[in-house]
Structures are given as C-alpha cells and as structure tokens.
Amino acid sequence: MTALDLEARKPTPVVTRRTPEPSQRFDPSRSAYNARLTEEMRQGLVNLQDLFSQEQLAFSAVGQKERVVEALRDYQADWVLGTAKLEIALEELDATSAAELFDVLTRHLPADDDSALAAYRMYFRAWGGVDGAAAVARSLEELPATRLRLEAGREALLSWAGDDPGSAAEHLTTMPETYGKDYLIYALPAAYIGQAPTAAMEWAQSLSPQYRRNALLHSTLAWVDTDLEAAKEYATQLSEESDAIDEASGVIFSRVGKALVREDPAAAAAWAESLPATSVARQQAMLGVIDQWGVADPEGASAWLQRFEASPVVDPAIERFALDAAEIDPPTAAAWANTISDPGRRVSSLETVLNAWMAQDAEEAQNWAQEHGYRLEANRPAQGN
C-alpha cells in the first residue's frame, strides 16, 4: 500500500479517471486550492493518482531510472502530477536502485530548493522501506543542514521503524553526532511505542544524557495517547525501582499524571498519592496532576494541594499552581508561593507572582509584600531582614 492509497483505510467509491477541463487543471498559483489539497493529502482524504487520467500518468520511459527522471521533470512543472507519477515510479524501488537514484534526485531537484521537499520526503520514505540504514545515513550525511534533512531523515526512519523499530533505534543510537540526529531520536517513539512500548521506553532510558529526557518525554507522550492504562502501569512499576528514577525519568510520571487528569482528576490524584511518599516519582506525578488540574479546575486542585505539608516533594506542584494563578488571582498565587518550603524556590516564585501583581495593582502588591516581610526593589522581591 502506498502512502496515499486509501483502499486499506476506508471504503471509497470507484473513481473514473478523466482528463480535467483546462479551467480545472491544477495551477500552483491558486494558493487556496493548494492549501486545501495539501491538507487533504495530510489527512489521507485524497489519492493524487485519482486526479489524473491514465494517459497523464503514463510514462514514456521504460527503465526505472528513466521513469524517476521523467517524474521529477513533471514535478518541476506541476508538483501534483509529478508527485503522483513519482509515487508510481518508486513502487519497485530496491536497496540497490534506491542508492543509485539518490544522485538522480539531487541532480534534478537541488536540495536547497524549498519546493523539492515533498519529492524528497516521498523518495526517502520509499528508500527507508527497503534499506533504512542507508537511507537514514545518507539523509544525515549528505543533505544540507536544513528542514529538508530533518524531514527526509524522518520519513526514512519511520518507514524503517514500521517494520523493525528495534534495529532502527539501535542504528540511530550509534550514528555520529550531527545536525538532525536529535530530531530523529525524538521522532522514533511515534513508531516504536505502537509496536513495542516497553522496549521503546528501555531504549529511551539507555540514551546518553543529552537525549534521554526528551526521548523519554516523546515516548511517554506517544504511549499515553495510545494506551494510557498501560503507560500508568509501567510508571507504577518503575516507581518501585528507586535506583532507576532520576530527574530525566521523572518526566514519565509528570506526563502520565497530566494525561490521567484529563480522564478523571480524582483518580489521577489518587494514583500520584499511591507512589512512594518521598520519591521523585511522586514529586513529578503531583506536578503533572497540578499542571493539568490547576488550569481546568483551580478550586479542586487547590483543595487537593491543601492536604499536603510543603516539602521538597510537594514544592514543585505548589510552585506550578502559584505561577498558573499569578495572572488570574495574584493574592491567592502569592499566598501559595509563600508556603513553598525551599527558600530559593519560594523567593523565585514570589518574584514572578509579585511582578504580575504589580502590573495589575501596584499598591496591593506592595502592601502584601510589606505585610509578609518582603521588599520590592526594582521589581524584584527580596526577603526582608
């Protein structure tokens, strides 16, 4: 099945190919049509080949290389027709021809041409399906350090990962450091989580510090979107392994907690409270719960927070709640910020809250600061002597 083929996605009526009337032919200058068609392509609602007649899609060339060249020339004249023909020309691509045709692609569509992006994405998607390692490597090594490299590499990687995410992950991890490697690492979880979520999380956990936190973030986001209950179960089990939890892996708990609030705030709060009392897991889970709940239902979130004494575990949640409330209810925000147990975090939070309050009512903000032993100098609160 090709990327734009709808047969496997939804039943569609048989479309009779026809040659459009001159007034109906695609004109790149028709920006509104262009934008609508691009959106339909993104959503998989249109098969480009159905826009043209069999005669328009026919090739005069016979060899695959020649057919690709013909499609690329058509692409330069009319990207919709050229894209439809390129899709057909790439159907029989194999590892050998893919590598050889890379030079053909770059010769006919210079990589610094912004209009070439769609063709490069299609080509690298096809290449990634037959030789992912080579496609990913060539994208990162030979394409310019622009959006083109990122998009082409992503298409190759995800096409490869659709069949073998473990090998794609292992190969990507061992590649040299270069522009775009981080982008691909953070793109991989979208494909990996859907097939082997636990393996995907273990891979993200194994990455070097420069990639680990964001890889765990993207992996968790992908998992909570597809199977929140399984993600919660994984996080719960991980919380029992204190040695496996650090600041980077804390993002797992914050994102699971945030997602749970959307389903049931009370259940999300109960889950956060069930985690080890003094752990990073509970700290980050509470932060995630408040991050979502504090915006959706400030009164409910406030009532929940009031059950806890300020402590290093609770401080981040209190700070988040105070900062979220700063623009809406400065007195409440200041009162909460003033309960933070860590002095440095407390002063930093109060600085933000009081500055927001000063912009709304300078006199009230000054009065509160004076009453609570703070002085506002140059818009910065400093704890009074």
Image: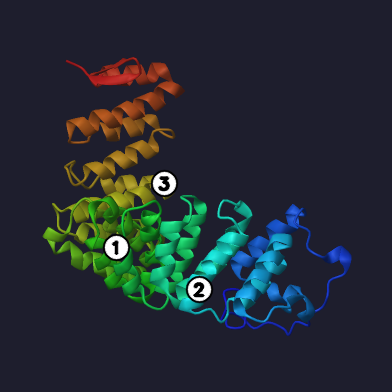
Q: Position of residue 322 (x, y in %)?
A: 33, 37
Q: Are marks 1 and 2 in contact (CB under 8 Å)?
A: no
In the picture, the disc for residue 173 is 1
Q: Position of residue 280 (x, y in %)?
A: 18, 52
Mark 1 or 2, nearer chain start: 2
Q: Nearer the viewer, residue 99 or 247?
A: 99
Distance between mark 1 and mark 2 Cα atoms: 23 Å
Distance between mark 3 and mark 1 Cα atoms: 38 Å
Q: Quadrant of residue 84?
A: bottom right
- Look at label 1 and name its amino acid: Thr
Q: Residues within 10 Å of mark 2 (few under 14, many from 20)?
A: many
201 lies left or right of 38: left
| SS class, disc 3 | helix
336 lies left or right of 77: left
Q: Nearer the viewer, mark 1 or mark 2?
A: 2
Give the residue at mark 3: 295
Name the residue rendered at 31%, 57% in the picture: 176
Q: Quadrant of residue 326?
A: top left
Q: Quadrant of the N terminus?
A: bottom right
- Look at label 3 and name its amino acid: Val
Q: Nearer the viewer, residue 143 or 337?
A: 143
In the picture, the disc for residue 98 is 2
Q: Quadrant of the C terminus?
A: top left
Q: Residues within 10 Å of mark 1 (few under 14, many from 20)?
A: many
* Callout count: 3
| SS class, disc 2 | helix
**From this viewpoint, is residue 380 visible?**
yes
